[in-house]
Amino acid sequence: MQIPKLKVLVEAGAVRAVAVSYAADAGGWTVQVTYASRHGERREVLDRQRGGVRGFATLDAVARGLAGLGLPAFRVDATGLPGVGDELP
């Protein structure tokens, strides 16, 4: 899913959930959007304009981008993020 489609879904009130997860192979954080469709709920990953999964370098960049689209809240899954799960001293 590209940004223009996401904007339409947000304006229509069809977005049900947004999840952000870390994927090293995608270059950072990826965004998955769950939305209502005529055939039930669908889930799609946010894509780059020229194809492929859109990776964000930081969670701050994700938050600013999604908030700018009217989606200020989302769930985060940091599984696979380097350093996550390391024991505290």
Image: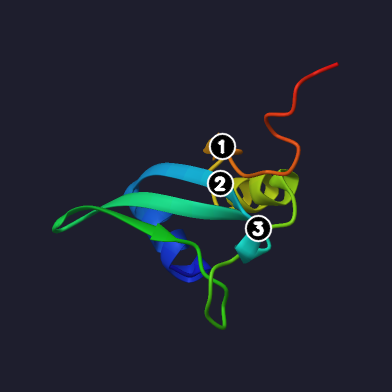
Q: Is residue 88 visible?
A: yes
| Quadrant housing residue 55 | bottom right
Nearer the viewer's eye, disc 1 or disc 3? 3
| For residue 65, above or below residue 3 | above
For disc 2, the marked residue is 21
Q: Amino acid at mark 3?
A: Ala
Residue 30 at x, y percent in the picture:
57, 55
Tell which of 71 and 47 is nearer to you: 47
Q: Amino acid at mark 2?
A: Ser
Q: How many marks?
A: 3
Is label 1 in a helix, a strand or a loop?
strand
* Furthest residue toward right: 89
Tell which of 64 and 50 is nearer to you: 50
Is 18 positioned to the left or the right of 83 in the image? Answer: left
Question: What distance separates the C-alpha of mark 2 from that of mark 1?
Answer: 6 Å
Q: Residues within 10 Å of mark 1 (few under 14, many from 20)?
A: some
Tell me whether the residue at label 2 lies in contact with that at label 3, contact meaning CB atoms closer than 8 angstroms: no
Residue 88 at x, y percent in the picture:
80, 18
Quarter that holds the N terminus? bottom left
Residue 63 at x, y percent in the picture:
66, 44
Q: Residues within 10 Å of mark 2 (few under 14, many from 20)?
A: some
Q: Residue 24 got which mark?
A: 3
Is label 2 in a helix, a strand or a loop?
strand
Question: What distance separates the C-alpha of mark 1 from that of mark 3?
Answer: 15 Å
Tell me whether the residue at label 2 lies in contact with that at label 1, contact meaning CB atoms closer than 8 angstroms: yes
For disc 1, the marked residue is 76
* Furthest residue toward left: 39
Q: Amino acid at mark 1?
A: Val
Q: Residues within 10 Å of mark 3 (few under 14, many from 20)?
A: some
Tell which of 43 and 2 is nearer to you: 43
Tell which of 27 and 12 is nearer to you: 27
